[in-house]
Each structure stands twice: as C-alpha cells, then as structure tokens.
C-alpha cells in the first residue's frame, strides 16, 4: 500500500515540482486536500526550524503523517543572505520579481557570484521526526535569463551548466535541484522502511 503523506504547502509550484519528482511512489495530500487554510507560521531563523514548524503544525492539529520543506538561496558574498528570508527578501508580499531585482541590485559590481540553493525537508512519520537536505551550488547571473521555473530560477546557474534553472526547464531542474535531492532522500527513506 502506498504511503499517504500531507505535504504542508500552499505553493502550487512546489506541489507540482514535488509531484513530478515523486511520481507514483507516494500519494501525497495538499493542505487543500485536508481542508487546512491556516497561515502556518514560518518564524524560525533557520530553514530547518521553519520546516519543523510547518510539519509540527500539521501533525499536532490534524494528527497526520506529513512533510514540509523550507528553501533558501544563500549567497556567499552576502554572508548567506537572503537565506531563510528568500521568499520575503523584498518584503512580506512574497514577490519573486521584487526579490530578484533586490538581489541583483545588492550584488551590482561584485565579482564573487557564488551561491547555493538549499532545501530542508522535515518529515513526521509515526510520531518520529526526520530531516533531509538537498544542496545545489552555482552562481548568480548579472541579469535575468529565461522564464520557466519560479523564485530565483532566472538568475541562478547551477554548477556544471551554463544556463539558469529558468533556461534549463523543469525536466532538467527536477533531476538536479536542491529540492529534487531532498525529495529523493525522503523517497529513498520511505521506500526503505516499507
């Protein structure tokens, strides 16, 4: 029997991406599917902390096995910023375009463009908590390139490639991304305990 898990997100892009990566291995439910319309707090100062807050909220309020993620873009020359504040770097509106423009502005004239995307997944399964991490290193471009993907994809070139995530497209991104790595670790773990 397939494992049923709640994925604690309202982000349609994340739902689609994770669904594509997991395929038919795991049946997961969205927050909509369990009728959760709460604004789950993300008040921790680490990715791990935010991922745990979200999964613990679902587990304690709905009593279901679940997982959640938090992702950040960590730029070396900016001491890891925007990091845990990636989604609201330019303000609380979660405006991807404004976030990208602010980051490009803050990096204007800087030669060190090294950055990494990091995803942490928190899984609560049968009352136990587990963490899985995925990291992809790369560089920040000087300007926007490409239109697919979401978030900072148009300004991030993953290591080993000469195109941004937005130019590479979903098929390649879903094989190499930080979220893909973390989701594959989650999937491998779930398969190993069945």
Image (cartoon, grey):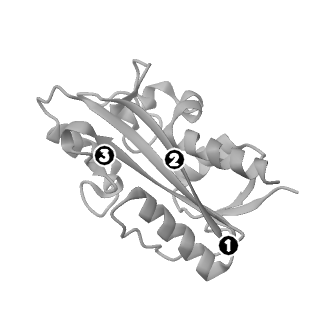
Q: Nearer the viewer, residue 191 or 66?
A: 191
Between marks 1 and 3, how big is the CA–CA gap? 39 Å
Query: Do we see residue 19 in this rendering?
Result: yes
Residue 133's tag is 2
Residue under the point 77% across and 47% down: 25
Q: Is residue 177 left or right of residue 151?
A: right
Q: Is residue 124 left or right of residue 48?
A: right
N-terminal-most mark, 1 or 2: 1
Q: Is residue 112 above or below residue 32?
A: above
Q: Residue 37 falls in which quadrant of the image?
A: bottom right
Residue at numbered disc 1:
127
What is the quadrant of the N terminus in the image? bottom right
Q: Position of residue 103 (x, y in %)?
A: 23, 42
Q: Is residue 163 above or below residue 117?
A: above
What is the quadrant of the C terminus in the image? bottom right
Residue 97's tag is 3
Q: Nearer the viewer, residue 168 or 107?
A: 107
Residue under the point 73% across and 43% down: 23
């Amino acid at each position: 029997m397939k494992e049923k898990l709640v994925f604690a997100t309202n982000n349609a892009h994340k739902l689609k991406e994770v669904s594509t990566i997991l395929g038919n291995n795991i049946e997961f439910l969205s927050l909509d599917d369990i009728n959760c319309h709460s604004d789950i707090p993300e008040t921790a100062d680490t990715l791990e902390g935010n991922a745990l807050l979200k999964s613990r909220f679902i587990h304690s309020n709905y009593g279901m096995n679940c997982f959640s993620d938090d992702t950040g873009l960590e730029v070396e020359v900016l001491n890891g910023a925007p990091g845990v504040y990636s989604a609201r770097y330019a303000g609380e509106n979660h405006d991807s375009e404004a976030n990208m423009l602010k980051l490009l502005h803050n990096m204007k004239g800087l030669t060190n463009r090294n950055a990494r995307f990091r995803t942490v997944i928190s899984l609560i399964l049968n009352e136990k908590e587990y963490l899985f991490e995925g990291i992809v290193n790369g560089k920040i471009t000087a300007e926007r390139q490409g239109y697919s993907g979401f978030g900072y994809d148009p300004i991030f070139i993953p290591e080993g490639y000469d195109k941004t995530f937005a130019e590479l497209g979903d098929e390649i991104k879903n094989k190499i991304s930080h979220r893909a790595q973390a989701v594959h670790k989650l999937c491998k773990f779930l398969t190993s305990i069945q």
